[in-house]
Structure formats: structure tokens, C-alpha cells
């Protein structure tokens, strides 16, 4: 089955700097890769996703890139702000299958 | 538009007590899920229901049972609570019938077993 590894487990950046979180997956048939943000005391919320027919997707300050050959995908947050501090989860799945989540990354943005 | 609603938000149980966590979604999704989240352990799947009338075990099903009451509702039952079941429980739903889409999560139930 699918296995998703996520790095780093914690990440501290200065406000205004960029943050990058990387995930690798094992199942070459996986074709859907979402990212979730979980704020303290809340449930995870989908912030961006990408499908395997696209190499990059952007939404304002966040972007996701996908390298199918290397089987890894990354979340990029530019111009980080204190409100970006949260736990971020990546996930992967093949068509019509359950998501497999990474272990999460705690992002701290220092002001 | 409520999305996924979980009740209760907080609960304290004594060891051996039973309880049912309720979950309802109003997005007409086919699939529903129960996860637990412990510090440093990410999200672990307990049970899921791919469609109304079906349920399957996830990664950590021991000590739990589920019921897919109808398309909207998916409950999680602890028959005899144990301290190891102290956790935050999340319900989620998604549309998986034809393709993959992101999950919508509820706000969680914080359960403490003493």
C-alpha cells in the first residue's frame, strides 16, 4: 500500500521568509496530493491540492510542486506570516482510494 | 453550510464506560471516516465507510465500533473505554465515487478517559 513520509517534523522561520515542506510517496499509481493546515484546537483544513497531470499549482502565497519521477511533492509558503503557524499535513492517494497522510510538520513563524 | 458536525466537543469518561461519538455531514458525500490524533502521531484511521451500508477497518480499529446510520451520519462507539483511548477524534467526509477530492474534517471531539 501507499506510504507517505513528510519532512521536516518541525520548521521555524522568520516572518517574511519562505517555508518548504517536502513529502515522498511510494505508490506510483497515486494521482492526488492534497495539503492540509491544522490550527490549534481545530480540525485539518484543505488548503491546496494537485493532481498528477499538473506539475505545479499556486494560490496566492502558497504553491505545491509535484515530481512524479522522483515521487515527491512539496508545499511552498512565501512571505510567511504569524498566522501561517500551524501543523501541516500532506497526503496521497490513487483514484477512488483513501488518503494516506504524512506525519505532519509543525511550522512556527517567528515575528 | 455546516460541513461536518461532531458532537460532543469534549467528554470525560471513566475506565469501562461506553459512549458514542456522533458525526453528520451535509455535503451529500458518499464516504466518511473516523481518525484519532495523538501528540506526535499524526492522523490514524480508525474506521471508514466508503458508501452508505459499508464499513471497513482502518489502521487502529481495536476497541471501537462504527455505524453508518444513513448517508449523512457516521457514529463511533467505544464499548468499554480505556485510558489508551484518550485522544482527539476527528470525523471527515469526502466524495470518492468517481475521483479523488479532499476530505472535509469536523472540529473534533476531545476525549479523556480516567
Image: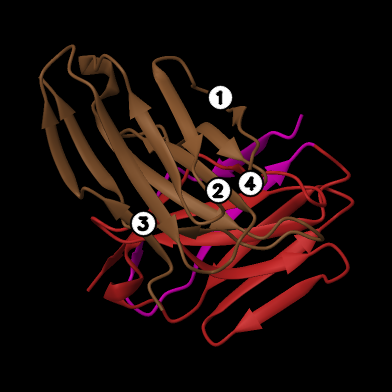
Chain colours: A red, B brown
* Disc 2 to disc 1, C-alpha distance: 15 Å
Residues behind callouts 4 and 1 on a single chain: yes
Residue for badge 4: B52
Which is more N-terminal, label 1 or label 4? 4
Q: Residue at x 49, y 45 (%)?
A: A8
| Alpha carbon separation for disc pair 2 and 3 | 15 Å
Numbered mark located on residue A43 in the image: 3
Query: Which residues lie in the magenta part?
Result: A1-26
Task: Kindly report the distance in space between the C-alpha atoms of the residues bearing marks 3 and 1.
Answer: 19 Å
Q: Nearer the viewer, mark 2 or mark 3?
A: 2
Most frequent secondary structure within the magenta stretch: strand
The percent coordinates of residue A10 (x first, y second) are: 39, 47
Task: Give the residue pinned by disc 1.
Answer: B59
Above or below: residue B112 compared with residue B17? below
Q: State the residue position of label 2.
A: B32
Does the residue at mark 3 contact the one at mark 1 (Cβ under 8 Å)?
no
Question: From the viewer's perspective, is the residue at label 2 or at label 4 nearer?
Answer: 4
| Depicted A66 relative to depicted B16: above or below | below
Circle nearer the viewer, 4 or 1: 4
* Residue lying at 39% horizontally and 50% vertically, measured from the top left: B23
Between marks 4 and 3, how big is the CA–CA gap? 24 Å
Amino acid at each position: 500500500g501507499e506510504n507517505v513520509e513528510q519532512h521536516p517534523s518541525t520548521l521555524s522561520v522568520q516572518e517574511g521568509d519562505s517555508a518548504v515542506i517536502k513529502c515522498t510517496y511510494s505508490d506510483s499509481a497515486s494521482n492526488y496530493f492534497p495539503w492540509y493546515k491544522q490550527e490549534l484546537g481545530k480540525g485539518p483544513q484543505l488548503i491546496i491540492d494537485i493532481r498528477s497531470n499538473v506539475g505545479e499549482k499556486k494560490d496566492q502565497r502558497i504553491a505545491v510542486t509535484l515530481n512524479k519521477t522522483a515521487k515527491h511533492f512539496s508545499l511552498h509558503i512565501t512571505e510567511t506570516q504569524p498566522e501561517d503557524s500551524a501543523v501541516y499535513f500532506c497526503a496521497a492517494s490513487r483514484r477512488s482510494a483513501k488518503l494516506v497522510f504524512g506525519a505532519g510538520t509543525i511550522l512556527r513563524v517567528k515575528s | 453550510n455546516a460541513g461536518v458536525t461532531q458532537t460532543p466537543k469534549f467528554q470525560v469518561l471513566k475506565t469501562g464506560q461506553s459512549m458514542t461519538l456522533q458525526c453528520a455531514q451535509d455535503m451529500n458525500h458518499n464516504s466518511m471516516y473516523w481518525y484519532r490524533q495523538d501528540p506526535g502521531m499524526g492522523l490514524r484511521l480508525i474506521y471508514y465507510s466508503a458508501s452508505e451500508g459499508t464499513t471497513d477497518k482502518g489502521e487502529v480499529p481495536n476497541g471501537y465500533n462504527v455505524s453508518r446510520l444513513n448517508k449523512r451520519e457516521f457514529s463511533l462507539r467505544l464499548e468499554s473505554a480505556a485510558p489508551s483511548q484518550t485522544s482527539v477524534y476527528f470525523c471527515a467526509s469526502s466524495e470518492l465515487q468517481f475521483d479523488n477530492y479532499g476530505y472535509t474534517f469536523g472540529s473534533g471531539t476531545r476525549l479523556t478517559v480516567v
